[in-house]
Amino acid sequence: MSKSPKSKNKKTNSTRKAHAVARASHAKMVINKNSKKKVQAHAPVKEIKKIDQAKPKKNPAIMPPDVVKSEIDRLISNTSATEYLRKNVSKTSIEIISMLVTPKTDEFLAEQLGMKINAVRRVLNIMQGYGITNYYVSKNTKGWLSFAWYINTSKLTPFLDHVSELERDKVLIDTDCNDYFMCGNCYETDKLLYTFDAAFESSFKCSCGKSLARIDKSEAETMSSK
């Protein structure tokens, strides 16, 4: 005996309902599974936060403040060295060195000296080329990198020896530079010749306000030997 259409529809509806329940149950399992993965993916966040908050490791190149100050005083008291830095780096190089008894960020130095941060970074980078300055990098809790500059005291003696050697040879200019600059208004009193880098740092302007004049390497060597 054949079943009535009503009976068939009832069975079909029951089957559909069973399938729907099965699908819902399966979907719930997938959601829970994915949710578990999602929690696991975010688990390391606490660990990262701890790393960000950690203090930078002690750098053996950074000496105690009293030792650094003593070395800075030794450098600043050397007239030939300060003249060399003023000519080949910047007039502000000695001021910056004096502030690095303890590590300072370039932002702090720029704010204290009333200079543009790019100008300060340029001076620091040039002095790093001579081995005088260096920096370490740390990260704060927001993930921002901070560059703290310090005096590399182990390199000051070799630098002073280098300057002394140049002084004996009557060469206190950078022999790798071809373009030099001077202030026609101040040269007779300060006897300063500037490399391209030093002149660029000051926007080719002397502190007196007058524009710096360009001279070639042979003129600079003749003037510096007098």
Image (cartoon, helix red, strand yellow):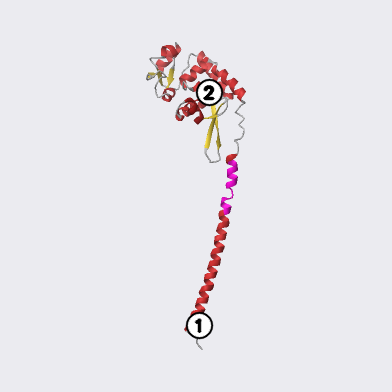
Tell me, for residue 7, which label it has, or none.
Answer: 1
Q: Nearer the viewer, residue 64 or 163?
A: 64
Tell me, for residue 97, which label it has, or none.
Answer: 2
The percent position of residue 62, horizontal first and vertical second, equals: 60, 28
Mark earlier in primary sequence (1, 2): 1
Q: Nearer the viewer, residue 137 or 10?
A: 10
| Residue interval drawn in magenta | 39-51
Determine the residue positioned at 51% across, 79% down.
11
The percent position of residue 61, horizontal first and vertical second, equals: 60, 28
Q: Is residue 34 above or below residue 57?
A: below
Determine the residue positioned at 50% across, 25% down.
127
Q: Nearer the viewer, residue 159 or 86?
A: 86
Tag 1, which secondary structure? Answer: helix
Tell me, for residue 110, which label it has, or none.
Answer: none
Which kind of residue does numbered mark 1 sit on? Ser
The percent position of residue 163, horizontal first and vertical second, equals: 52, 18
Determine the residue positioned at 57% across, 40% down.
52
Which kind of residue does numbered mark 2 sit on? Ile
